[in-house]
Amino acid sequence: MKNRQNSIEEARRVISATLQKIPGVTDIRIDLEPFTEKYKADLHVSFRKQDDRKILLVEVGTSGQPRPARAAVNRLMALQQNRSGIYGVFAAPYISDVSAEICKNSGISYINFVGNCWLNFDPIFIEVSGNPNLPGVKRKMKSLFKPKAERILRVLLHEPGRQWSTVELAETAEVGIGQVSNVRNLLLEREWIQDQKQGIKLTGPLQLLEAWLAEYQPDRNSSLGFYNIDTTGQIEATIEAVCNRTQTRYALTGFSGAARYAPFTTYKTVAVYMDDMDAKNFQGLPFKPVTSGANIKIITPYDEGVYHGCRKIRGQTVVSAIQCYLDLKDEKARGEEAAEALFEQEVKPLWQ
């Protein structure tokens, strides 16, 4: 309740500040309660532009993601129906690009708490963008891409056509039910999943993967560089043999993984996840540690979720196509092209 009250006060502040900047606008009045039940909204705003008085009905949300934005737009459209001179405005701390389009397509104006807006009420039109988001908005977005939350995303993206109950999803992702509930709410806000009788189902895999790629932080891993004169194939075979002998979990990724899913180009650097990166794991690996010029990257994962969906391809363990796609972001020398080939040949068909 406190968050909502704070949001209404913030909306009041930013709307007042924005209207005051418009030449010729006078007599601005903003009420926290509607004048009558007929015009019920979070804020009732009126002002004069020359001799014409305008009325704004403002719905204030604590989230500006598509689901709450769509609900607010529907309420505002009903409130302003068949009433001339009355305009709906959706206000929230942050308004996503998709939410902005929902508002525009419905003829509803919007404004966020840092002043980015699209205000369209004849004869006034204002569009502002580029003001940085509030810190709290960034934290909420990043919470969707923390290690335990990412485990849930991997499960959903790996089997996008499946309906998941909360318990099934928690068990498969190896996280708590509370974690699933938090991620579920964030995904519902963005309209990337549907809540169905049998559970939730992923409906926006591309949007989810694109958002994750933008936030993905490969530097959370720790890695060591090595050099060996053998070919990449020989190096990978050596890693496989030693890991099998020492019962060390491993999985090829980067170009090494992509080459097994969707061969695109020759590559010179082997990348592999390996558990417990210490001296005992390197017994039998004839690789020379180097600080530059490495052609082998052995990675200790920031979270064991990276192993979800691993496959055996030609006898060697490879991370899932989703994980490999994310890791190619960190690869130079045609990593982006290899990622695109992997997406077209392996990832995209999962969603069809």
Image: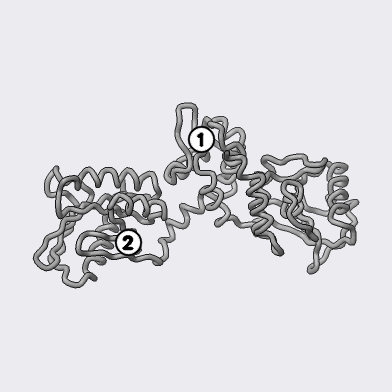
Work out which quarter of the rendered image holds the C terminus and state it. Answer: top right
The location of residue 197, given as percent across then percent down, is 45, 27
**Residue under label 1:** 201
**In the image, what residue type sits under mark 2?**
Cys
SS for tag 1? strand
At a point 38% along the width and 55% down the height, the residue shown is 95
**Residue 274 image offset from top left, x and y in percent:** 76, 49
Looking at the picture, how far across and down is residue 98, in whole percent? 41, 52
Type of amino acid under label 1? Lys
Between 209 and 297, the one lying in front of the other is 209
Front residue of 176/196: it is: 196
- Horizontal arrangement in the rendering, residue 186 relative to residue 154 (left or right): left
The quarter of the displayed image where residue 127 is located:
bottom left
Image-based side of 189 in relation to 150, left or right: left
Q: Quadrant of residue 333?
A: bottom right
Mark 1: give few (<14), some (14-19) or many (20+) Cα within 10 Å: some
Q: Is residue 31 above or below residue 290?
A: above
Q: Which residue is mark 2?
A: 117
Residue drawn at x 54%, y 47% as measured from the top left:
206
Q: Position of residue 294 (x, y in %)?
A: 80, 64
Residue at the far top: name it: 198
Alpha carbon distance from label 1 to label 2: 33 Å
> Is residue 211 in view?
yes
- The numbered mark at residue 352 is none
Foreground pick, 253 / 260 = 260
Question: Which sits in the foreground, 320 or 148?
Answer: 320
